[in-house]
Image: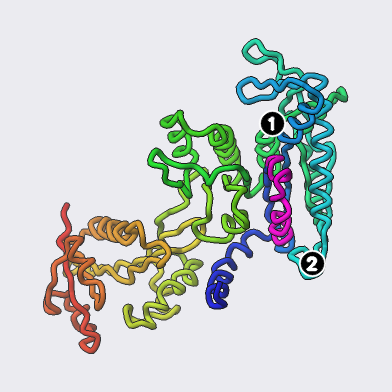
């Protein structure tokens, strides 16, 4: 990466860094991440997140380690609808394997070698009996024995550890009030913990790029409803997606701000998902991430970040903060996940029954889905509601865009008298007018 590219990326990451400080993230990863050595590099990303003030709860599985121990003892591996049937001998293997994985994770998080990403790291890990469990019982006539489900998460104890700047490590073992130990599904522990803690993010690291549509295209963002429809419409979706995606849906419907499905095969995938606009996996939200709304005074900074580069290039007339603040009621903004990515203004000329579309700007990173047309439709609707018959725009660079959307080139004389008096003949902006259909 060139130095300039790094600087640009780091600046783009700054809003996320501010937003994530003090937030609670639950990260779920299978035992294969530890078995295959990928947790070594993941510790670097975990160290970075903790250094940025993120409160982390890591939930680990141990499926491959369990099955390796079962194979050593010649035990039969039994599943029922994706759930392990855990008898007494299998439970011994589960306990041993979970302990092994926990020790490996804690040892890797304790590294603080100089001249490495873990230099000066001071990650304190807290693990314990934070999960109360109960047996799943009999499903479809099959007794799952010591396979259980989460009954309660000790959020008070976990939050105390997080407030002391400790990383909380949860395994897939749960304990009943009667002292029994149960083998719990990884996704159940992670989802239940995220909901109980009111986490800002639940992140599943798994073996796929994310959720794909019927054409095999990665879906970087889905609402809970869209994700449900995708599952219902594509029963052939791979097993991992059918396992984790319903948990992500459940989490966001129960108050978790965002859920993510990320490939654990990508080095740095966790950071790329969290600190870049597009991410690398699939993000699930309860409601659409993008909203078009009336601007308010708090939006001015984000609007100026979009407008000023175009003013410097001469594409837009200079306005300045004071003028925008004074006319904020005339602006609408397009917001994506808390970031202003577009804006537009309407200036009505009541006597002439014409309105001006002005200051239509879209963030360069978001121009691929014709959001400009969405803002145009919004202004047209506003103009109709105000009783305007025509909409006009002045431009020096985007003539074709307006023509393609029903505008016709016109003369300065066709502008409302008040606007005509303010026309800048040095800029020589072209005039385009569109008659509004009722």
Distance CA(mark 1)–CA(mark 2): 34 Å
Residue 189 location (% of width, % of height): 70, 35
Dot 1 alpha-carbon crowd within 10 angstroms: few under 14, some 14 to 19, many 20 or more: many
Residue wearing tag 1:
185
Q: Which SS class for mark 1? A: loop
Q: Which SS class for mark 2? A: loop
Residue 42 in the magenta stretch? The answer is yes
Question: Where on the picture, by quarter, is residue 181?
Answer: top right
Residue wearing tag 2:
119
Q: Can residue 22 be seen in this view?
A: no
Mark 1 against mark 2, which lies toward the viewer? 2
Residue 180 location (% of width, % of height): 85, 24
Residue 135 location (% of width, % of height): 75, 21
Please state the extent of the stretch shown in magenta in the rendering: 30-49
Residue drawn at x 80%, y 36% is 98
Vertical order, 309 against 173 (above or below): below
Front residue of 90 and 328: 90
Residue drawn at x 79%, y 30% is 69
**Counting residues from the N terminus, which is met first, the one under dot 1 or under dot 2?**
2
Dot 2 alpha-carbon crowd within 10 angstroms: few under 14, some 14 to 19, many 20 or more: few
Residue 198 in the magenta stretch? The answer is no
Contact, mark 1 vs mark 2 (Cβ under 8 Å): no
């Amino acid at each position: 990466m060139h130095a300039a590219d790094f600087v640009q990326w780091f600046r783009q990451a700054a809003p996320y860094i501010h937003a994530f400080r003090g937030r609670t993230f639950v990260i779920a990863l299978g035992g294969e991440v530890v078995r295959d050595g990928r947790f070594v590099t993941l510790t670097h990303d975990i160290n970075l997140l903790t250094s940025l003030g993120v409160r982390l709860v890591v939930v680990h599985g141990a499926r491959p380690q369990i099955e390796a121990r079962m194979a050593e003892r010649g035990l039969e591996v039994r599943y029922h609808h994706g759930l392990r049937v855990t008898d007494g001998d299998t439970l011994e293997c589960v306990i041993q394997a979970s302990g092994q994985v926990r020790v490996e994770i804690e040892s890797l998080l304790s590294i603080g070698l100089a001249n490495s990403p873990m230099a000066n790291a001071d990650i304190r890990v807290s693990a314990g009996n934070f999960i109360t469990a109960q047996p799943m019982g009999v499903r479809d006539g099959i007794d799952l024995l010591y396979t259980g489900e989460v009954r309660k998460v000790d959020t008070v104890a976990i939050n105390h550890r997080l407030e002391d700047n400790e990383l909380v490590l949860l395994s897939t073992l749960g304990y009943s009030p009667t002292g029994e130990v149960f083998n719990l599904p990884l996704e159940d522990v992670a989802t239940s913990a995220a909901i109980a803690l009111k986490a800002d993010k639940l992140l599943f690291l798994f073996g796929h790029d994310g959720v794909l549509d019927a054409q095999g295209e990665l879906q970087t963002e889905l609402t809970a409803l869209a994700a449900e429809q995708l599952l219902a419409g594509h029963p052939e979706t791979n097993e991992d997606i059918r396992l984790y995606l319903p948990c992500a849906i459940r989490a966001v419907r129960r108050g978790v701000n965002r859920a993510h499905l990320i490939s654990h095969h990508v080095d740095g995938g966790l950071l790329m998902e969290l600190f870049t606009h597009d991410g690398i996996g699939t993000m699930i939200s309860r409601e659409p991430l993008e909203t078009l709304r009336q601007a308010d005074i708090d939006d001015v900074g984000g609007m100026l970040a979009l407008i000023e580069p175009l003013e410097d290039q001469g594409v837009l007339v200079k306005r300045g903060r004071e003028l925008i603040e004074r006319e904020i009621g005339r602006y609408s903004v397009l917001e994506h996940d808390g970031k202003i990515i577009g804006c537009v203004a309407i200036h009505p000329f009541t006597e002439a029954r014409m309105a001006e579309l002005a200051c239509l700007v879209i963030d360069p990173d978001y121009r691929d889905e014709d959001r400009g047309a969405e803002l145009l439709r919004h202004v047209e609707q506003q103009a109709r509601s105000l009783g305007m018959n025509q909409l006009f725009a002045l431009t020096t660079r985007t003539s074709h865009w307006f023509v393609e959307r029903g505008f016709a080139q016109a003369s300065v004389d066709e502008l409302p008298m008040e606007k005509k008096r303010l026309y800048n003949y040095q800029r020589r902006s072209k005039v385009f007018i569109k008659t509004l259909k009722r």
